Amino acid sequence: MDLNNYEKLLESAYERIPENIKQSNRFEIPKVILHLESKNTYITNFNKIINTLNRDKKHFFRIFLQKAGTMGEIRGNQLFLKGRYKEQVLNRLIEIYTKTYVLCSVCNKPDTVIQRESKKLFLKCAACGVREEIKEK
């Protein structure tokens, strides 16, 4: 087979692949949808964020409030935060949480679970098999 012909066939095949399949990253860090009411902030898509991250509500809630430096509570499908917050700030906190508690540091896939051993937390990746201690930043 001619090398030039092979490359043309390869390019032709690649062009036929749908755009949504070409994307190599199947996981996107969720973005907040906010509702501001007086001096309070509501994250209206809280359940969607939790489902996308595949983490325990209470764990996410505790870490998120700690990083935000505020008080809050879960009200139905929403997360209530005391104080007014901008989307960029809250999205950044979710990004930090995701990089620390969800994504594998070796293969960068979200196929992980949190395991507790005595007082230490470990992130175990189902995709590549790595197990490493979670170091909170």
Image (spheres, grey):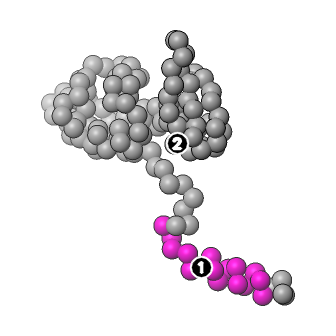
Query: In this rendering, does residue 89 appear at all?
Result: no
Tag on residue 111? 2
- Looking at this view, name the residue that lies furthest to the right: 2
Q: Residues within 10 Å of mark 1 (few under 14, many from 20)?
A: few
- The residue lying toward the viewer, choosing from 92 and 135, is 135
Tag on residue 59? none
Query: Which range of residues does the magenta coloring cover?
Result: 5-20
The quadrant of the image that shows the C terminus is top right
The quadrant of the image that shows the N terminus is bottom right
Q: How far apart are the two marked residues, 1 and 2, measured between alpha carbons?
A: 30 Å
Left or right for 95, reference 123: left
Q: Which amino acid does the dot numbered 2 rest on?
A: Asp
How many numbered tags mark residues here? 2
Query: In this rendering, does residue 98 appear at all?
Result: yes
Tell me which corner region of the image, top left, top right, bottom left or bottom right, holds residue 49.
top left
The residue that appears at 53% across and 30% down in the rendered structure is 100
Left or right for 89, reference 45: right
Q: Is residue 85 covered in magenta?
A: no
Where does the image place residue 53, in percent across and percent down from the top left?
42, 40
Q: Which residue is mark 1?
A: 15
The residue that appears at 32% across and 36% down in the rendered structure is 86
